[in-house]
Amino acid sequence: MPESPLAAVHQRLGARLTDFAGWQMPLSFTGTPDEHTTVREQVGLFDLCHMGRLRLTGSDAQSLLEYVTPADIAGLAQHHCRYTVVLQADGGIIDDIIVTRMPDSVFLLCVNASNRQAVIQHLHEHRGERTVEIVDISDSVSQIAIQGPASTGLIRSLLGEPFPEFMAVATGSFNEVPLIVSRTGYSGELGVELFVPTTVVVPLWEALLLDAVPCGLGARDTLRLEMGYPLYGHELTREVTPVEAGLSWSVDWDRGGYLGHDVLHRHRDTPTSRLVGFVLTGPGIPRAGCDVLIGGQVVGEVTSGNMGLSVGRGVGMAYLPISHSKAGTELTIDVRGRHLTAWVTRPPFYLRGTVRDATPTP
């Protein structure tokens, strides 16, 4: 089973480890609630070395990306990032990724750990006669995240140029070793993700620990859920399209020629289901797999659910028929035989210190 290059450091810190996408990764250090609050109020440090990192080069790299994703890659400025999805021909989602355009027609892709090989295979299958080289740099380049409102000082210490704007990257250094500082994250808070040579990731992590608290995948999940960010294998699968998943904003509707184009347009024009958020009106914690009912009839299933630690109520997401997806619709969540009332609520449930729709009304 693969281990993060930071595995020995995590064990020394007493991390509780878990199997995630075939990797041994820290689930928590001091406990998910504490780590969640730390990121919301101060600054947390996450090991993301399990994520996949790919580099595409060559004159046709842009063309290949515009074929397998619905994003406007041509309009992506140098040193900027774009969230998008890798599509099948039927519009199903192989993975959700972040694409970064670097100088000299180089594209960096950050992909999910469980889908790294699937994305690589998909790119090779559709490369055709294009001039493009696809290189897996996941072993030689590591990834960590600094997240939280107090992260600015740590980030500035690494930068040799101005702080990057949202969804942009800047170059920095640690011990005179170059690294990439990407203004991206999965928590909804101020922060960055660092792409650093694996040879220096351990001393960098230990230096950052002087001012940041280590956090595990448990807090990463509760933070992203409060923002309504989808998780592959839960909200995103090969059986759903980005339109159904609420990701229409990531589709370049003005162009064609990409996989799944006709299916996406059909789902946009005649939608049948939609991913929605919901908030419980009383005590209880929804979990993935719980049935969602309206009028006693099962109409969907919870894709992700947990206690909204900053919200103070149970929150979750589910796919519902379009006729039941309007905000304010009353739902019943079946949690091991307990029927809990909830309201359809548009995420995020919590945003930069403000609880949104914690006590929804129809």
Image: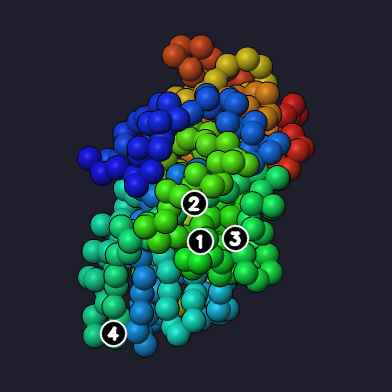
Q: Residue 225: x percent and y percent?
A: 56, 38
Q: Which residue of the protein is positioned furthest toward the top in this rendering?
A: 337
| Residue contact at pointers 2 and 1, CB within 8 angstroms | yes
Which residue shows up at 32% across the image and 37% down it? 24
Residue to which mark 1 is pinned? 175
As measured in the structure, the alpha-carbon distance from the residue carrying label 2 to the one carrying label 3 is: 10 Å
Q: Residue 118: x percent and y percent?
A: 27, 57
For badge 4, the amino acid type reads: Arg
As measured in the structure, the alpha-carbon distance from the residue carrying label 3 to the one carrying label 4 is: 37 Å
Residue to which mark 4 is pinned? 130
Determine if residue 13 is in view. Answer: yes
Q: Is residue 89 above or below residue 325?
A: below
Q: Which mark is residue 204?
A: 2
Residue to which mark 3 is pinned? 158
Query: Which is nearer the N-term, disc 2 or disc 4?
Result: 4
Q: Is residue 209 above or below residue 259?
A: above
Question: Dot 4: what SS?
Answer: loop
